[in-house]
Amino acid sequence: MRRLVASIIAVALVWGVLSLIFPLAPIDIHVRWAPDVTAAQMVELERRLQLRDGKETDPRTWSYRLVNPSTANIRALVQAKEVEDTNGVDRSSYRPSSDLSTQSHRTAIFVASSAIVGVIVFGVFPVLPVILTTAVRRATVLGPAMWSDVASAISPTACVATSRPLSHQVTIAVLLAGVVISAAMTLFAGASLGSSVGALAVIYAGGYLVGSMLVARTEQLSFAIIRTVAGLMLTSIAFMLSLVLSLSWFVLPCALLIAALLIRGRAAFAWPHERIQVGWDGVAAAVLVIVLMAPIAVAFARMGHGPFPPVFYNVDSPRALEEVHALTLTRSYPPPSLSSVGVVRTYHYGVHAMAALVSRSSGLLPHHALFLIVLPLLGVGMVAAAVASARRLAPALPLCVCVPLLLIATPSLARAFSDGFVPRLSTAVTSGTVTLDWINADYVLWGVLSNEAQNTDFPILGSIAAIAAAPSIGWGLAAFLIGTSLIFKTTTGIALVGGLMVAEAWRAIRSRQFRPTGPMLLAGAVFAATFAAFYLVSFDNAASVQLYPLAHIRGIVTAGRPVSERGLLIDALWLFLPALIVLTVRGEAKARENAPLLIMAIAPLLVVNLTRLVSTRDGGMGAGPEDWLQIPHTVPFLVHAFTVSLASTRWAYLGWARRVAFVLAVAIVTAPVVIAAITYSSRLLRSPESGHEFADNRAIAPALAAIPTRGSIVVTNDLRYPTDNFGRDDRQIQIPALFGHQAFSVDFAGEPIEDRRPLQRLLQRPEWSDAILSAARQHHWTHLLIRKDYVHPHPIPLQPIFENDSYIVYRFP
């Protein structure tokens, strides 16, 4: 059975690789629509059949680019009752009419190559490990030593799962937790019971079971959680890869689950057997963790309540939800933009794909999947990774000292930190008044809002925990988290991969082994595969990386600097303060093993001081210098991990005074973040509208609910996003985010659609123009959303279908 499964997987991989190398190119076709086809039906068919760049050539005939010229898609096009005739495809063989021989030759190569590989794998599967070992040893240029490094990094012997039976106590606890979560989602959020249970089943199957491929043994509860999150990340990557290969979205996730069950067997279902002991240290750590995570927990609960998100916090939240909606509908990758019809862009869709996978698999609404399942799971994963890191790196220190420090995300040495609070602190000290305004004046400054939307910190903390556990579980988990972090946050991926490469290079040089190490090869291979699958194949060249020595330093000493000269020194002192307390104390020889974490922290700073990112996009923000400066976001996590590891190895050599000084230094760094988290959480609970980048969706939601989500294209007169008293213009992303509507162009600030500006201005004039109807016919506008208190044409000669105090919705003829 395993031989058959292995051969099937090999066939799928070969077919996928060949499809990436020799993709089906879009073809030019003409479609004559039936006389009774409405504009809404035409839009839906264009989306479903992947017809792009439509241009009207006569009243019922349009020219298109057929993005997916597969036989199945062309058959659906030809047989659609709404299509009267086509030109450019063979209506009998359902293939492109041009270059049929090339397409047939391509298919024949795919079939032959995949079949040959499948037969070979089926025949040689029993001796495949021996063959691969011999082949790699002979093919490796640097000899058997490199192969030995890779083999030891993978640590096959450490990946053998425990064969202990299921723990009935843990099983009961998990089932009770599932019942409580399902009931809470049903009663509080309004989700259906079936979809809530289905979502948890997806987390278990696509997370915990598939995660056994990465973490076979889960003796500790913290690593069971890490395994669940990492497994769901892996399944989500398989989901996106299915879209890349034009397969049904569930094919590769299901294949991955089957492979995990066949490889791990009964051990995949085994629960952790660690005995949980509750003491003062654990209770204190839990209280601090709850306080630190409360701001995002309250925000998630408020955004996830009800049949639509009633509010948004953080402008990234609606953008993330829009992309979740897009991934729940799309059959291709990258998904089309819902903000701007016809726009497709490369992006780090990892977290969005996790939510889309849960939504598509369970029927859960996208905002429930994102705000009540995936983002809370990533938050719990962060805490579990911090606990696992503390136990591995700093067994001599209390958890209540290590875990909160590991969760703190500031300062990153890239943006203003001390410049924000030092003047306020100085004023408070000189005035003699006791106040916490120097902390509470800027909640974002302290990083208490981290892990919102796509800005998850789990890949960073999970990588630290995986590196710390690598001696016992191998480098498989660490290589996966580091190598795939690119698709979950691009700047995080660059920082982690760059940091690991520099740290491993330092380790190799120190050991006088001048060759790539096993961890370097594993992580590099995963990173290269991730980039090739999700960026290289469909890369939109909207930015370029340039060599620019001392780019970050130049920004400090010139106008518009990210931090000031004095601020940089204070930030560095603040970041390294606990480490400086124990740095001068001599400890055990193994303390040198802490150095790679510090080197990994330095690497992102080297990247931003050697290179810069320049946007090449015409219109929209695109990627630019500000995005590039997010790379050092990993620095505080890595420095704090280095700090607790260093302190633990030297703890036995510290005197009483030095130990007290270290704990006080950690308290100085941690206390302001805890205070900011407490005050911001209470502020959200008392006055929800005072939250960071608050947007109220309750006025616009009924208007959007009157518009069908399928087959409609929405235009509006008001492109202001209602946060900070309409402080953000040109990005009315509530429209695509709330229910997944397709907008014509509502995000001029983020996407390259400046050529549509004249059409948008037609809707922002006090007089009605026939040009509006002409544009509606040409671009398939179906509905007009008017905000009453913003400039708009009057009167409007269209049929109104909804009206409330703030909005009117019209339907185009």
Image: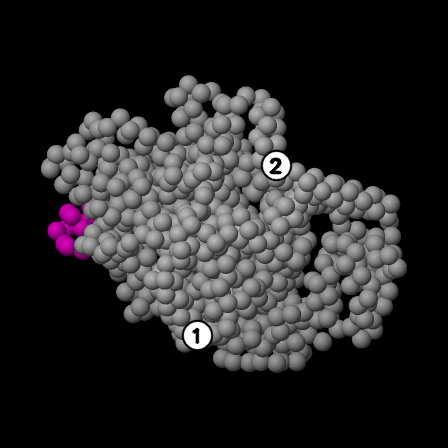
Left or right of 800? Residue 194 is left
What residue is disc 1 on?
186
Q: Residue 410 at x, y = what percent?
A: 33, 45
Q: Describe the colour scheme in one phrase.
A: one colour
Residue placed furthest toward the top: 512
Select label 1 or label 2 by which is in front: 2
- Secondary structure under badge 1? helix
Quarter of the image for the C terminus: give it. Answer: bottom right
The three-letter amino acid code for the residue at tag 2 is Leu
The mark found on residue 128 in the picture is 2
**Residue placed at 82% from the left, 47% from the top?**
103
In reply to whether residue 387 is colored magenta, the answer given is no
Q: Does the image show residue 627?
A: no
The three-letter amino acid code for the residue at tag 1 is Thr
Left or right of 780? Residue 636 is left
- Mark 1 Cα within 10 Å, few/some/many (few <14, many 20+)? some
Q: Which residues are magenta?
A: 425-437
Q: Does the image show residue 642?
A: yes
Q: Quadrant of residue 643?
A: top left
Q: Residue 372 at x, y = what percent?
A: 43, 64
Label pair 1/2, CB-CB below 8 angstroms: no
**Residue placed at 61% from the left, 36% from the top?**
127
Q: For marks 1 and 2, give the CA distance.
A: 50 Å
Q: Residue 161 at x, y = what percent?
A: 44, 47
Vertical placement of residue 248 versus 604, above or below:
below
- Secondary structure under badge 2? helix
